[in-house]
Amino acid sequence: MNIDFANLQLQYRKYKNDIDTNIQAVLNKSNYIMGEEVYELEHALEEFTGVKYAATCSSGTDALLLAMMALDIQPGDEIITTPFTFVATIETITRLYAKPVFVDIESDTFNIDATMIEASITSRTKAIMPVSLYGQPADMNIIQSIADKHNLKVIIDGAQSFGATYNGRMDSCLGDISTTSFFPSKPLGCYGDGGAVFTNHDEYAEKIKILRVHGQNQRYYHKYIGIKGRLDTIQAAILLAKLPYYKQELSNRNIVAKNYTNALSGIVRTPIIKKERSSAWAQYTIRDNNRDLLQKKLAEHEIPVAIHYPLPLHLQECYKYLGYSVGDYLKAENASKEVLNLPMNSFLLEGEIQNIATILHE
């Protein structure tokens, strides 16, 4: 059985006419940098999420960088986050010479344990950066109440969770600034790199939109030291073509996840989604202390899998200077040895899922 991990080819064939038409329109106009499609997409993202401002940018990584630049994060400032995430989360913190301060994860959701955050706050703490890992938001009520109490900012790394909700609101609307990624394999992906920053704050939105074009508030006049953080017009056109189908894709992803959970119950530990939240299901992540055997079984049947993530960030070679050691964040370390990501896309058939379950049960 030939199962594709993200199945971008099938998705393209389904939306081919819309995507090709939008790309051709950009080619006809040859307005490749900050063309009208960029602004059309931003308006569409605002409509979709309910957030006041959406600013597109060159990647999910640059979205985080822009968010911290807008908040004027300085060298030596501390940002509390999770050690169990993709490196971009803290790569951007350290690129600004700020310091990531880790808090261990919840074993069930893999997200930062919000109840442990307050103990890590110091006089240098400026922000909390929860990650909506695998598509599910962290416990934002607790996080926001801690931030309010200590006068901290909240930046949500929503690279994997566009369209996910917490208490009925999309996580793009939460915190001071929220971000996402449009990397091709993300739930809503373009055909290259892309991202977006979301906020309900007028001043942050204005600053982010200036920062992403080299800090220009008018051509060749630079208000801030910025970056080249624009989204290409062609990528905006592709996302404009795909966005109208996205609500249905989210619904389909939830059906796929439910089918997985039903089929795998009693075989492996399956994902937990808290009752006040919904997930965008960027990944379907099982957990087992015999992961290598499961991976081998699936490989024998040519079923693609991934491990997100095999080594927590506090143990990465490039972050040795932070002084962390094995055993500092045991829940993240244990998760890194046990998680396994199965094929996940909105087109997976129930029979394909059942086949994966049968292989894992053998």
Image (spheres, rainbow, N blue to C red):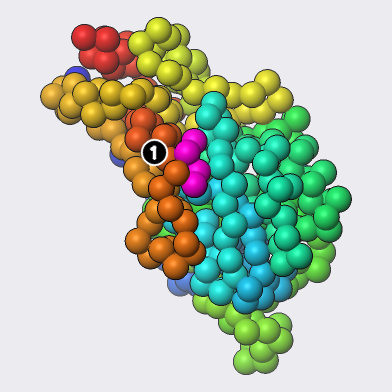
| Depth order, front residue of 101/145 | 101
Image point (47%, 71%), residue name: 32
Query: Which quadrant does the C terminus fall into?
Result: top left
Density class for disc 1 (Cα within 10 Å; few <14, some 14-19, many ≥20) is some
Q: At numbered mark 1, what does the secondary structure look like: helix, strand or loop?
A: helix
Mark 1, residue position: 336
Does residue 228 appear left or right of residue 50 in this picture?
left
- Residue 41, compared with residue 214, is above or below; it is above
Image point (78%, 58%), residue name: 152
Q: Position of residue 16 (x, y in %)?
A: 39, 42
Q: Amino acid at mark 1?
A: Ser
Query: Which quadrant does the N terminus fall into?
Result: top left
The quarter of the displayed image where residue 217 is located:
bottom right
Image point (54%, 26%), residue name: 108
- Give the prevailing secondary structure in the magenta stretch: helix
- Residue 100, compared with residue 146, is above or below; it is below
Q: Position of residue 113 (x, y in %)?
A: 63, 38
Which residue occupies the extreme bottom position in the image?
A: 220
Q: Position of residue 73 (x, y in %)?
A: 67, 71
Does residue 240 appear left or right of residue 267 in this picture?
right
Q: Position of residue 308 (x, y in %)?
A: 39, 41
Which residue occupies the extreme right position in the image?
A: 149
Task: Specify whether residue 135 is in view.
Answer: no
What is the count of numbered marks?
1
Image point (57%, 60%), residue name: 100
Residue bounds of the magenta highlight = 328-332
